[in-house]
């Protein structure tokens, strides 16, 4: 009994940092990948995080090489966890260079953001 109790104590101590400081979601993958060259047209842009993000907070801003915004609508989840998000351009992206700027909020309410570029040809 005593041994079980101390294992329980160790486990709860190990688990504590996770509760004390919830980690901010990290971007683990994008599709198209950063700096990649992909075949045009591009129908979707995906972002994948290691932790769920607040769906309402997510925004994608896609611009072409001239800085002109591309309408990609409101991002939507591709899973049940809000880790993988997708934006669908109104018109599939023709050949060109594109920049994707994204903003989201993690479970801790802290904003996260990033950007990447890709080329469609
Ligand atoms: Cu998708």
Image (tube, rainbow, N blue to C red):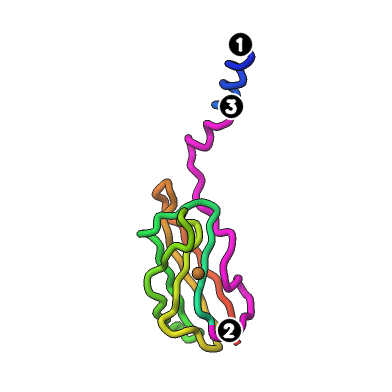
Query: Is residue 23 magenta-colored?
Result: yes
Q: Which of marks 1 and 2 is nearer the N terminus?
A: 1
Task: Specify the quadrant that holds the N terminus.
Answer: top right
Instruction: Please identify the quarter of the rendering in which residue 8 is found.
Output: top right
Say whether mark 2 is within 8 Å of ligand 1.
no
- Residue found 40% across the figure and 62% down from its top: 58
- Residue found 50% across the figure and 75% down from its top: 44
Q: How far apart are marks 1 and 2 (CA)?
A: 63 Å
Query: Is residue 32 magenta-colored?
Result: yes
- Write down the residue under mark 2: 120
Task: Specify the quadrant that holds the C terminus.
Answer: bottom right
Q: Which of marks 2 and 3 is nearer the N terminus?
A: 3
Q: How far apart are marks 1 and 3 (CA)?
A: 14 Å
Binning the other alpha carbons within 10 Å of mark 2 as few (below 14), some (14 to 19) or many (20 upward) gives some
Of tags 1 and 3, the one toward the viewer is 1
| x and y percentages locating residue 37 in the rendered image | 63, 80
Say whether mark 3 is within 8 Å of ligand 1.
no
Of tags 1 and 2, the one toward the viewer is 1
Binning the other alpha carbons within 10 Å of mark 3 as few (below 14), some (14 to 19) or many (20 upward) gives few
| x and y percentages locating residue 15 in the rendered image | 55, 32
Q: Distance between the residues labelled 2 and 3?
A: 49 Å
**Viewer-nearest residue: 83 or 109:** 83
Left or right of 19, for residue 71: left
- Write down the residue under mark 1: 2
**Taking 65 as reference, is 20 above or below it?**
above
- Write down the residue under mark 3: 11
Which stretch is magenta?
A: 13-41
**Viewer-nearest residue: 72 or 98:** 72
Left or right of 70, for residue 116: right
**Taking 4 as reference, is 43 above or below it?**
below
| x and y percentages locating residue 66 in the rendered image | 47, 86
Secondary-structure class at tag 1: helix
């Amino acid at each position: 009994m005593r041994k079980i109790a101390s294992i329980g104590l160790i486990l709860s101590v190990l688990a504590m940092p996770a509760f004390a400081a919830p980690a901010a979601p990290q971007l683990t993958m994008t599709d198209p990948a950063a700096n990649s060259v992909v075949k045009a047209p591009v129908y979707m842009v995906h972002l994948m995080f290691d932790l769920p993000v607040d769906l309402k907070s997510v925004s994608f801003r896609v611009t072409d090489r001239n800085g002109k915004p591309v309408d990609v609508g409101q991002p939507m989840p591709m899973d049940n966890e809000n880790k993988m998000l997708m934006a669908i351009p109104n018109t599939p992206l023709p050949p060109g260079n594109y920049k994707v700027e994204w903003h989201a909020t993690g479970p801790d309410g802290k904003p996260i953001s990033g950007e990447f570029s890709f080329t469609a040809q």
